[in-house]
Amino acid sequence: MQLDEDQVERLGLVGVRAIVRRNLVLFLSVFAAIMLVAVLVVMFKDRLYVTGSVIVLDDRRVTIRADLRPIANLEVALSEMQTEVEIIRSRDFAEKVVKRLGLDEDPTYNPLLMRGLADAYSPIENLTETTSKLLESYVVSPYRNTLGIGIQVHDTNPTRAAHIANEIARTYIDLTLEIQQSSAHEKIDLLVDRMGELEEEISGIETELSNLILSNQLDDDVEGTALSAELRNVLVRLRFLSESDAPQSEIEQLEQRAERVQAQLEQRSKAAQERITLEQRLEDLLARRQILFQRNRDLAVHAGLMEPLARQISVAQPPLEPALPNRNTVLAGSFASALVIAFICILLREMLNKRLFVRRSVHPALGLQGALAFPQFPRAARHSISELIALFDQRMPPDPRAEGARHVLSVLMDRLSQDGSARMVITSSSQTDQSAFVTLCLSVSAAKDGLRVLLIDIDPTDDPSVADLLPRARSQYGLPLLLGNALLMTQETVEIADKVKYVRPSVDDQVPVDLFDSHNMWSGTAALSDLYDQIVILVPPITENAVLGRLLSFTDNVVFITRDQSSGVEEIVRSLEKLRQLNLEPTKLVNFG
């Protein structure tokens, strides 16, 4: 599939000049239309006046802890600053400003009133529309490394702009005081509720204690003494009757009396112990009530002495001159935008005329959507390294095949720049995809862009596409030893083009699974990264060798190559399945060579 000169357009300076010259009428028409719109905007757009006020947060603020005690001298954190900014930007806050200023009665801020529809809508809907308009008219931003917050208002009326800016500041200051006082009163109400609960608990314990004392006559010491004396007399009488020949019925009566008196004494003793427990509990509750009473009094004093958490340090003044639109800025921006848009328009026209280098994947149903197209190089460049390099050196005009390779490389480098790595592994679907030639072209293209390139060929087969371009001799050292020793790698490389070093490691040393588990390997690859701007490793087809999976620790930037009208469907499907098993989404490239 041969590319003609008129099917490939270079995007260098020469190509840009040719494109513009070909579409000069379209370019000038788009440019003039955009500049005309810009001039009309500058002439007829409403003049906006910008003014602002500044409030500063007080770092000597006071708050209340979880135990309801006030804490003073808290520093204002950055997160708190941002929170206060978002409060001023909020819709609820803007509604307060609208109500205080009566902006819902101003047709400039109430679109419904301006269109004469205010009476047809409810007051809430009028307030909502006015609030949305007000939110669009002011900007709130914190000053870096300070406690200041700037409020900037733009309005068609300079006096009204200053009035709104100052009212926003005053509303925020009043809001901070209102929130503090509300919080303090909520804490006071909570304390009052707790004190009420304590009072009920104290009253219950006092009633229980009183009933206990009365029912057991705990305050009557004579009763206790009498019971003890009675028990003692009964026991003496019982001992006397047991030693004499007294009737058994009399002895049993005395035993029952002794048990009854003893039970009364035990009950009295338990009641006395329970009385002690209740008295201790009552004492604890009274102490807690006193503590809550003291905290309630402290919070009441604190609420009465509260001050706003912010103060206004800069009062907005009506501006003398409008700030927007800035004529110079609008015209300069329009000029630059007109140039860009006009150039994009002519590029779209070129694409529609199929003048730009655009190719589609030949296997879209196999998962190759969006694959990059690699151009077909002439036969002479495929059999002579000097002829190939000459194509990339050609500048006036540039060779279209070389420009196509540069385009592919630029896309790959954009992807590599996302993770800061300049390492790339290239594989293919089969041995007939000419991946070695594509890799060589990409390496030469990178070198022509000023990069130092190291090309490592670990494909055990001899790719016929580079039989006349690359040296076929292999190094006596395997890939593990070369990657781990930058000096040895440098000694074993061969310079095949300016800034392009090439090496074919020995196939006797297999790539181990734990290749990158050692510190020496990482230090060696780091040294190679210092020596070379881009490291490219050509590996065998993924369906024939598992070495790709063992190099993923080195880089996960993988390029998968197929060949137009040559790669088999089964080979492509098997290769993509292998890549999915490795959790890889490689950059796909179709070789049209």
Image (cartoon, rainbow, N blue to C red):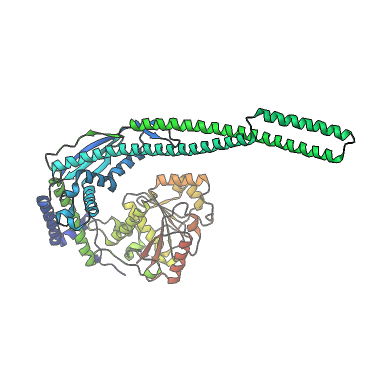
- Residue 467 is at least partly visible in this image: no
Residue 471 versus residue 366 in the image, above or below: above
Q: Position of residue 82 (x, y in %)?
A: 33, 41
Question: Looking at this view, is 104 or 479 the one in front?
Answer: 104
Q: Position of residue 276 (x, y in %)?
A: 61, 32
Identified at 80% across, 39% down, the residue is: 253
The residue at the far right in this view is: 245
Residue 474 versus residue 94 in the image, above or below: below
The residue at the far left in this view is: 43
Numbered circles on residues, count: 0
In the picture, which quadrant includes the C terminus? bottom left
Question: Looking at this view, is 192 or 464 the one in front?
Answer: 192
Question: Looking at this view, is 418 or 111 the one in front?
Answer: 111
146 to the left or right of 580:
left
Residue 555 versus residue 281 in the image, above or below: below
Q: Quadrant of residue 319?
A: top left
264 to the left or right of 197:
right
In the picture, which quadrant includes the N terminus? bottom left
Identified at 28% across, 65% down, the residue is: 358
Identified at 38% across, 62% down, the residue is: 588
396 to the left or right of 68:
left
Residue 544 versus residue 481 in the image, above or below: below
Identified at 27% across, 39% down, the residue is: 172
